[in-house]
């Protein structure tokens, strides 16, 4: 009976961490660098090319770092401002692309997101757009993907609230696809403590700065204990056996956690470092197993609609 109770609890936990994947389409795909071009004032700007593909955001070259360069490109309207220009190697080649965000002067702080190639040209090529993000935010991840955050007015957290009261609760990630010719939504592999890379990278910055209370995320044993204590109500100091990895410079780990209550339930948790960073990267749980139970449906990366049936 005790074992069945833990199995049911385990299934509930796994079901709870299945995130919905909503794939959005983009517009006007394009790729590749260009030749040096002249601006209307006759100044020639070379197309920026780095020695190799770099991870994360990079300094934007002139004139792409000037908001005025983008006013006509994004067709800026009254009540809109260029809020941010971020550059990076988003499509897997050494030339830079630009993420340009436009903020609306409305109560929902709506954000439009655009990605461009040939960024120093007078007419850059639009690769992707994602308009209408309520209380929106956008950034380039350390994995060269686009991260967005927004408020979902229909979520349980926000339903019935005014636009000024909405809280940011929908986080998505988009990665360049050669076959699609644009950015497509992808799934973050982590299931604990984070369900999205947006949240994970925020926590990584906090931990790097020594802020917050989540320094335990640098230790795989403490991460495992936090998981079982939070979701399975096991003891906070439940015994953990490291089966592989888990050292200061390892980027993967497999641990086994034992329940100290009668019944001796055991689970095995697989961890990886955030973005493969084995120099201070946070541990993210990517898989959980227990004897006699597995989840066969839905499959990883599958497009889901609510309600979801979980097959075991």
Image (cartoon, rainbow, N blue to C red):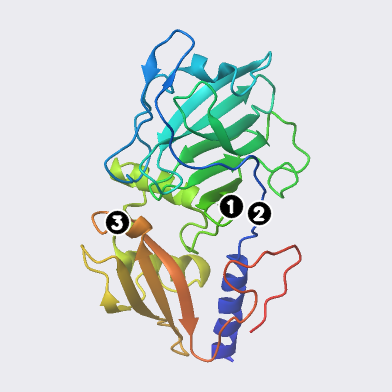
Q: CA distance from mark 2 to mark 1?
A: 7 Å
* Cα distance between the residues tagged 2 and 3: 28 Å
Other-residue count near label 1 (Cα within 10 Å), few / some / many at <14 / 14–19 / ≥20: some
Q: Which residue is painted at 29% across and 40% down in the image?
A: 209
**In the picture shown, does residue 242 fall above or below 308?**
below
Q: Are marks 2 and 3 in contact (CB under 8 Å)?
A: no
Q: Looking at this view, is 37 or 261 the one in front?
A: 37
- Counting from the top left corner in percent of width and height, residue 180 is at 59, 54
Structural distance between the alpha carbons of marks 3 and 1: 24 Å
| Numbered tag placed on residue 23 in the rendering | 2
Q: Kindly check if marks 2 and 1 are in contact, taking CB atoms under 8 A apart as contact.
A: yes
Where disc 1 sits, the SS reads strand
Q: Residue at x 24, y 66 (%)?
A: 250
Q: Which residue is mark 3?
A: 277
Task: Name the secondary structure under disc 2.
Answer: loop
Is 247 above or below relative to 216? below
Residue 29 placement (x, y as % from top left)? 59, 43
Q: Nearer the viewer, residue 65 or 238?
A: 65
* 2 or 3: tag closer to the N-terminus: 2
For the residues bearing labels 3 and 1, Cβ distance under 8 angstroms = no
**55 above or below 196?**
above
Secondary structure type for disc 3: loop
Q: Which one is nearer the viewer's eye here, 108 or 173?
A: 173
The answer to whether residue 96 is seen in the rendering is yes
| Residue denoted by label 1 | 184
2 vs 3, front mark: 2
Decide which of tag 2 and tag 1 comes sooner along the chain: 2
Q: Compared with residue 303, is residue 201 higher up or lower down, i.e. above or below? A: above
Residue 272 % position (x, y)? 36, 66
Query: How many numbered callouts?
Result: 3
Q: Position of residue 228 (x, y in %)?
A: 45, 71
If the image is split into quadrants, where does the C terminus sit? bottom right
């Amino acid at each position: 009976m005790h074992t069945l109770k833990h199995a049911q609890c385990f299934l509930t936990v796994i079901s709870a961490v299945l995130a919905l994947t909503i794939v959005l389409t983009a517009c006007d795909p394009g790729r590749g660098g260009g030749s040096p071009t002249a601006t209307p004032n006759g100044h020639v700007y070379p197309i920026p090319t780095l020695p190799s593909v770099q991870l994360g955001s990079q300094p934007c070259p002139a004139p792409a770092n000037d908001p005025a360069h983008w006013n006509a490109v994004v067709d800026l309207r009254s009540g809109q401002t260029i809020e941010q220009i971020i550059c990076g190697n988003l499509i897997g080649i050494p030339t830079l692309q630009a993420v340009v965000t436009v903020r609306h002067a409305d109560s929902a702080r709506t954000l439009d997101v655009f990605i461009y190639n040939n960024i120093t040209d007078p007419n850059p090529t639009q690769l992707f757009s994602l308009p209408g993000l309520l209380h929106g935010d956008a950034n380039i991840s350390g994995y060269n993907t686009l991260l967005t955050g927004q408020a979902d007015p229909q979520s349980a957290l926000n339903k019935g609230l005014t636009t000024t009261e909405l809280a940011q609760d929908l986080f998505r990630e988009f990665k360049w696809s050669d076959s699609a010719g644009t950015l497509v939504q992808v799934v973050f592999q982590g299931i604990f403590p984070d369900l999205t890379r947006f949240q994970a990278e925020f926590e990584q910055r906090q931990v790097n700065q020594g802020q917050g209370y989540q320094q335990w995320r640098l230790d795989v044993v403490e991460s495992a204990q936090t998981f079982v204590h939070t979701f399975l109500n096991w003891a906070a100091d439940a015994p953990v056996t490291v089966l592989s990895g888990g050292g200061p410079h390892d980027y993967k780990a497999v641990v086994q956690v034992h329940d100290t209550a009668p019944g001796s339930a055991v689970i095995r948790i697989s961890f990886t470092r955030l973005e493969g960073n084995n120099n201070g990267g946070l541990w993210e749980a990517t898989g959980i197993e227990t004897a006699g139970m597995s989840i066969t449906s839905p499959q990883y990366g599958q497009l889901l609609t609510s309600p979801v049936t979980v097959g075991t």
